[in-house]
Image (cartoon, grey):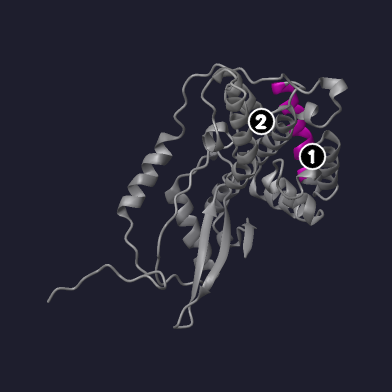
Amino acid sequence: MTLFDYRTDQYDGNDKRLKQVSETPTFMYTMPLGTLPNGGYRVFFEETSLVGRGDRRLTFEECKIRAFERLAYHNITVHGLEEEEFCYIPMGGELPDQNQRVVAFGGSANMVHPSTGYQACRMIASARGVANTISNGIKSQLLPDVIAKQAHRQIWNKTNRLERDFQAFGGDFLMEQYVENLRGFFIAFFAIKQPIWSGFLAGYPGLPNNHHHDSWLSRLNFALSMFFQMPWSVRIAMILFSITHTIQYGPNTLLRSLTPSNLFGDGPEDVNIQLDSVLGDNEAKQEARSMISQFTPSAVKPGVISEIIEVP
């Protein structure tokens, strides 16, 4: 399996295209799925933009083009497509208002990891606690508003929000970097101890190795471990971004997530916000719908009987 393939060798000699992919980077996931009777391979390929908005936002069509350009460079011939995946993951953003009666959960509660995009494991890890909170509240005949507030706090209490603030900083940093710095960043990331980086990928209470990230001291240790593994270009970029991020958002995000509570506190008890309704990236959704409707499989999954019936 290949993860975070940010190589751009396929564009050597094409300065215009190289500049484009360097400024709006994508990477490829590769996961072998098995072999075929004819000696070929079933492989899952996915070209992904890690975090992007504004000028860094890419279309699904551009990601598809880059995927085939990458495969062609590595002399990989695609003989057929079983299916195409169009995945649009909202990352970062505000948490739900904890004073509302409707209890948000999963994606609606913004449980998507703001640096990695992982969400399902975080949702599953929190499900029992939320269910028990609601069940106990009903058995105790608490008011619905009280039960809802307790359920919200179960998902996004102060400790969880501090961990998320640090993760959100990471996502914002990655979104600003060109491909060279992203390569350096992930070389440093995977150079630290496996339990530490794997704990960050999911990063939620109840998940493996989260103890490496659930306190200010553990997060500081993680940050420093990575920093000393980074190339100097990434270190400088990280320092400058940390300064501008703190100037823009104040000390109550990054600094609060990395320092004892007696310096900058540990945040409010509840999240109470008023935002205009945001529908997400409608252009991306429309593009995905259009490409899905136009796709015709050119290969059949092993073990699946073709639904094509020939009538003489």
Alpha carbon separation for disc pair 1 and 2: 38 Å
Check disc 2 and report the residue beneath it. Answer: 154
- Image point (76%, 32%), residue name: 242
Q: In the image, which disc is placed on residue 236?
A: 1
Q: How many marks?
A: 2
Structural crowding at the residue carrying mark 2, measured as other residues with C-alpha within 10 Å and reported as few (<14), some (14–19) or many (≥20): some
Give the secondary structure at mark 1: helix
Mark with earlier residue (1, 2): 2
Amino acid type, mark 1: Ile
- Please indicate whether residue 275 sits to the left or right of residue 214 in the image: left
Placement of 185 over or under 72, stated as above or below: above
Amino acid type, mark 2: Gln
User: Could you tell me residue 63's position as x and y percent?
Assistant: 48, 52
Residue nearer the viewer, 8 or 291: 291
Q: Is residue 70 visible?
A: yes
Quadrant of the drawing holding the N terminus: bottom right
Quadrant of the drawing holding the C terminus: bottom left
Q: Which residues are magenta?
A: 234-249
User: Could you tell me residue 115's position as x and y percent?
Assistant: 65, 41
**Quadrant housing residue 140:** top right
Structural crowding at the residue carrying mark 1, measured as other residues with C-alpha within 10 Å and reported as few (<14), some (14–19) or many (≥20): few
User: Could you tell me residue 265's position as x and y percent?
Assistant: 81, 20
Question: Is 239 inside the magenta-drawn segment?
Answer: yes
- Image point (39%, 46%), residue name: 288
- Please indicate whether residue 291 sits to the left or right of residue 202 in the image: left
Placement of 206 over or under 98, stated as above or below: below
